[in-house]
Image (cartoon, rainbow, N blue to C red):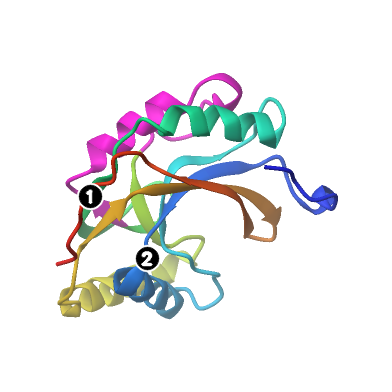
Amino acid sequence: MRLSPNEADRLNSFALVAYIRGSLGRFLDDLRLEIAPNCNPHAHVSILPPRPIHGSADEAWEHIRTRVEDIPAFPVRIAEIEVFPVTSVIYIALGQGRSDLEQMHRALNTGLLDFQEPFKYHPHITLAQEIPLPDVVPALELARHRWREWSHEREFLVDNVTFVQNTGQCGWRDLACCSLDGTPSFHER
């Protein structure tokens, strides 16, 4: 991976995510836009939440790539919609696959990616954040209503990861991605 010369518009804030593709990803993006119309959605679960790195982006990517190449793909089951009490972030909790994400986080939160996060790692899918406090309960009720209406798959496969960098103003740029090894066959439900 070689970064472009216009790195000046980016921050020393990086994350590792697994994007949610297909109809489930589109549904989650649409739901997020309905709840928080000013956001720029791209449904994902963070494996390494935003953090500064202690070295170059190329070195950080190599650290990630060499550690994920032996991790087999795994399914993640989506559970219920909840709210983090301290931050009022509305999110979807994860069931099956949560422990796999926690294990990946522990394996990758080392070396130049080591970061003491402000909150204990809690894998989830964010639906709304930084919304005015009076809007949290109505947004939560709307999200729960839409989630109850969704009759399609509630599971996705973590079979690849993407290294991203914050560009400021809530923008993220994909820098590199790779597949997890040993991808099992997966049938959407």
Viewed as shown, does residue 103 lie left or right of 186? Answer: right
Q: Looking at the picture, which amino acid does disc 2 mark?
A: Arg
Q: Residue at x 56, y 19 (%)?
A: 111
How many numbered circles does the render carry?
2
Q: Which residue is mark 2?
A: 21
Mark 1 secondary-structure assignment: strand
Give, as a single range, the part of the protein colored magenta: 92-121
Q: Which residue is mark 1?
A: 75
Q: Determine the image quadrant of residue 106.
A: top left
Q: Looking at the picture, which amino acid does disc 1 mark?
A: Pro
Q: Residue at x 41, y 48 (%)?
A: 160
Give the image location of residue 64, x and y in percent.
51, 32
Q: Is residue 117 visible?
A: no
Choose between 100 and 177: the one closer to the eye.
177
Residue 95 counted in the magenta span: yes
Choose between 105 and 158: the one closer to the eye.
158
Alpha carbons under labels 1 and 2: distance apart = 13 Å
Q: Which image quarter is the C terminus in?
A: bottom left
The answer to whether residue 128 is above or below residue 119 is below
Give the image location of residue 177, x and y in percent.
52, 48
Residue 65 counted in the magenta span: no
Q: Is residue 185 visible?
A: yes
Give the mark nearest the N terminus, 1 or 2: 2
The answer to whether residue 74 is above or below residue 92 is above
Mark 2 secondary-structure assignment: loop
Choose between 24 and 30: the one closer to the eye.
24
Q: Determine the image quadrant of residue 77.
A: bottom left
- Which class describes the residues within 10 Å of circle 1: few (<14), some (14-19), or many (20+)? some
Give the image location of residue 85, x and y in percent.
34, 49
